[in-house]
Amino acid sequence: MYLSPSGSCQKKFKVKLNFRQFYRKTVDLVGEVINLYTDLNKWLTITIINISMSGLRFKVIGPNDIKEGHRLRVNSPLTINNLTK
């Protein structure tokens, strides 16, 4: 995307715009998730890919029963040392 300034130099600059409400921090953390929608009392191993003030993105390792709309509980080692990599 190119933006043209309204000043007198009229130079164009390439910029990357991020419209997220909260910044997403890239992380590489191992955690666990359980599906509260099903009655299976089984914790699944996950890799947390990024986090923000309003959520996180993770990848489930192995088969799972998670579907859109399910409620989940996540356990993870969110410490200062892990977040500053």
Image: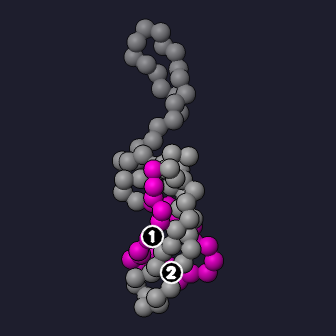
Asked if the magenta segment contains residue 28, the reply would be no
- Residue at image position (42%, 46%) is 23
Q: Is residue 15 visible?
A: yes
**Circle 2 Cα neighbour tier, 10 Å, few/some/many (<14 / 14–19 / ≥20):** some
Amino acid type assigned to the residue bearing label 1 in the image: Asn
Q: Which residues are magenta?
A: 56-80
Q: Give 23 or 78, whichever is nearer the viewer.
A: 78
Looking at the picture, how far across and down is residue 20, in whole percent? 40, 47
Residue closest to the far top? 8
Looking at the picture, how far across and down is residue 13, in whole percent? 53, 23
Q: Which of the numbered marks, if any, corresponds to residue 75?
A: 1
Instruction: Determine contact: label 2, label 1, CB under 8 Å.
Output: yes
Looking at the picture, how far across and down is residue 52, in whole percent? 41, 53
Amino acid type assigned to the residue bearing label 2 in the image: Trp
Q: Which of the numbered marks, if any, corresponds to residue 43?
A: 2
Q: Is residue 69 visible?
A: no
- Residue at image position (40%, 82%) is 36
Q: In which quadrant of the rendered view does residue 7 lie?
A: top left
